[in-house]
Image (spheres, rainbow, N blue to C red):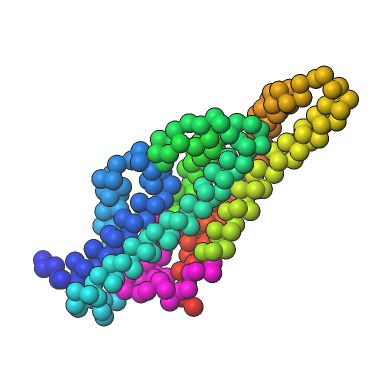
């Protein structure tokens, strides 16, 4: 059995796309999972899909052409991973907004998955969305869509031909919309509490409105957070499934 140089180049390019993808998708994008393990998952997936991958190596017969194709595959893998992570960015934004509205912005905790210090609500919602992501089987759909991306954009095809800029910018703007919608009940709650205690402060001047409203805001905010988990879950599920479709739409040619 002989292995041609072209087969080795194709396998390396497949590995670069899968490796970049596993470096950026949720759970694998943080510091909790070592780079060796992420590289191992990318290597395993590259071995499995390599026999089924179409390739066009017209410009890979010289050193510069191979480098250009390698950069192209890394960009494709990172682009697909970023699309999947959009819903998690929205969840983190919602967590920051909720923490600000209910008065827990100063309460920070370390997120071991991302290796950063976020507000406690943001960390809680991130774990919650990650749990939903695996429970409903979205990780299977993401892997299937990623494997199918090799048919839509084979090895050797440049992703710039698909012009993903416009759709990617729309997805980024959708992060702010979804994050704000998740936090909308808490924004309304904070507004009602501020108006209520402003009126109460005028009616009872000797009352310490600030300290009283602070405790009421936290208590009512945490109660609303528990009550709105189903609403937040619906946003996560709907937009998570939508991100799988956008993964393939964003690399369509033309």
Q: Nearer the viewer, residue 165 or 39?
A: 165
Residue 197: name its quadrant. Answer: top right
Q: Residue at x 49, y 37 (%)?
A: 118
Q: Main secondary structure of the magenta part?
A: helix
Q: Nearer the viewer, residue 10 or 51?
A: 10
Q: Residue at x 59, y 57 (%)?
A: 174
Judge left or right: residue 157 versus residue 171. left
Q: Nearer the viewer, residue 225 or 8?
A: 225
Position of residue 235 measured from the top left corner of the image (x, y, whole percent): 62, 47
Position of residue 85 measured from the top left corner of the image (x, y, whole percent): 48, 51
The residue furthest left is 1
Q: Nearer the viewer, residue 247 or 196?
A: 196
| The N terminus sits in image quarter | bottom left
Residue 60: name its quadrant. Answer: bottom left
| Residue 149 within the segment the image draws in magenta | yes
Judge left or right: residue 27 versus residue 97. left
Q: Residue at x 41, y 51 (%)?
A: 25
The residue furthest right is 203
Q: Which residues are magenta?
A: 143-167
Position of residue 101 measured from the top left corner of the image (x, y, whole percent): 66, 37
Is residue 118 visible to us here? yes
Is residue 52 visible to us here? no
| Residue 77 within the segment the image draws in magenta | no
Residue 153: name its quadrant. Answer: bottom left
Q: In the picture shown, does residue 118 fall above or below 70?
A: above
Judge left or right: residue 109 versus residue 155. right
Q: In the picture shown, does residue 189 fall above or below 11?
A: above
Count of numbered badges drawn on the protein: 0
Q: Residue at x 26, y 79 (%)?
A: 59
């Amino acid at each position: 059995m002989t292995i041609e140089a072209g087969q080795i180049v194709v396998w390396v390019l497949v590995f670069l796309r899968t490796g970049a993808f596993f470096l950026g998708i949720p759970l694998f994008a943080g510091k909790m999972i070592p780079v060796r393990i992420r590289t191992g998952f990318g290597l395993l997936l590259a071995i499995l899909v390599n026999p089924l991958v179409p390739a066009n190596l017209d410009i890979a017969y010289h050193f510069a052409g191979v480098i250009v194709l390698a950069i192209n595959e890394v960009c494709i893998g990172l682009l697909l991973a970023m699309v999947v992570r959009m819903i998690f960015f929205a969840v983190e934004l919602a967590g920051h907004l909720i923490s600000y509205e209910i008065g827990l912005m100063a309460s920070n905790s370390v997120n071991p998955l991302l290796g950063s210090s976020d507000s406690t609500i943001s960390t809680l919602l991130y774990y919650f969305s990650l749990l939903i992501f695996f429970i409903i089987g979205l990780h299977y759909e993401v892997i299937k869509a990623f494997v199918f991306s090799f048919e839509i954009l084979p090895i050797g095809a440049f992703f710039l031909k698909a012009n993903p800029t416009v759709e990617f910018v729309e997805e980024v703007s959708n992060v702010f919309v979804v994050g704000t919608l998740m936090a909308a009940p808490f924004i309304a709650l904070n507004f009602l509490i501020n108006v209520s205690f402003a009126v109460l402060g005028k009616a009872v001047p000797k009352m310490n409105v600030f300290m009283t409203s602070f405790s009421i805001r936290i208590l009512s905010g945490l109660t609303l957070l528990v009550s709105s988990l189903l609403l937040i879950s619906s946003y996560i599920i709907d937009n998570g499934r939508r991100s799988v479709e956008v993964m393939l739409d964003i690399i369509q040619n033309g």
